[in-house]
Each structure stands twice: as structure tokens, then as C-alpha cells.
Amino acid sequence: MPDRFCGHCGEQLGEGLGAARHVPCEQSLRLEPPRFCAQCRRRMVVQVTPTGWTAQCSRHGELSDVRADVAEGAEGPEGPEGAHGTG
């Protein structure tokens, strides 16, 4: 089985008691992008935008969490004016 690494701290992911130390990392990764590649432990180039984030590993390519509805400019259920529009 190939080694896997934590996307937050870059340390090797373990099993059993070793996995417990990554609980705070898992919580952080729910709110922010990974900083390390889970496959090779390289530091990734991360870009955060209003629509999400992208993280680029020089060996394994790009990960992203870009919201398609925001990125495409989709309108919400209230229409283009929103809930407080004048139209």
C-alpha cells in the first residue's frame, strides 16, 4: 500500500492511534484547502478565490473546490436582484 500524507500538516497518515492525531487536521480541511499533496507530500501552490480554491501539485496536478453555480454566475431562486431587489 502506498504511503498517504495529511493534506493539512504533511505528516504520514497512520492507522489506529496514529490516525487520532489527524482529527484536528481533518477539521481544518473542512474549512480550508489542503496545503500538502496526499500522494507525495509536496507543498502545493494554493489559490483561494470567492468561488472556491485550487491546489496544484507539481507532480500530481490540480485539485479544486470551485462551486459551479457561483463560477458560472447562476442566479439564485430570487432572480438577479436577490431577496432585497427593487425589481
Image (cartoon, rainbow, N blue to C red):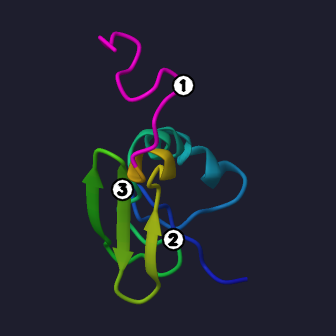
- Judged from the image, the secondary structure of the residue bearing numbered disc 2 is loop
Coordinates of residue 25 in the picture (x, y in percent): 47, 46
Q: Distance between the residues labelled 1 and 3?
A: 25 Å
> Disc 2 designates what residue?
38
Coordinates of residue 39 in the picture (x, y in percent): 53, 78
Query: Where, quadrant-wise, is the N terminus in this rendering?
Result: bottom right
For the point 42% across and 53% down, the residue is 72
Q: Which of marks 1 and 3 is nearer the N terminus?
A: 3
Amino acid under label 2? Answer: Ala
2 vs 3, front mark: 3
2 vs 1, front mark: 1
For the point 49% across and 61% down, the residue is 6
Coordinates of residue 36 in the picture (x, y in percent): 39, 67
Q: Which of marks 2 and 1 is nearer the N terminus?
A: 2
Q: How far apart are marks 2 and 3 (CA)?
A: 16 Å
> Disc 3 designates what residue?
53
- In this orientation, which residue lies closer to the viewer: 76 or 43? 76
Magenta span of residues: 73-87
Amino acid under label 3? Answer: Trp
Asked whether 80 falls inside the magenta stretch, the response is yes
Residue at the far front: name it.
Answer: 87
Pointers 1 and 3 in contact (C-beta within 8 Å): no
> Disc 1 designates what residue?
77
- Asked where in the image residue 62 lies, by quadrant, the reply is bottom left
Q: How crowded is mark 3: few (under 14 residues within 10 Å), some or many (20 or more)?
A: some
Q: Earlier in the sequence, mark 2 or mark 3?
A: 2
Identify the disc placed on residue 16.
none
- Judged from the image, the secondary structure of the residue bearing numbered disc 3 is strand
Q: Is residue 36 left or right of residue 19?
A: left
* 72 over 7 or under it: above or below: above
Q: Is residue 7 left or right of residue 4?
A: left
- In this orientation, which residue lies closer to the viewer: 34 or 81? 81
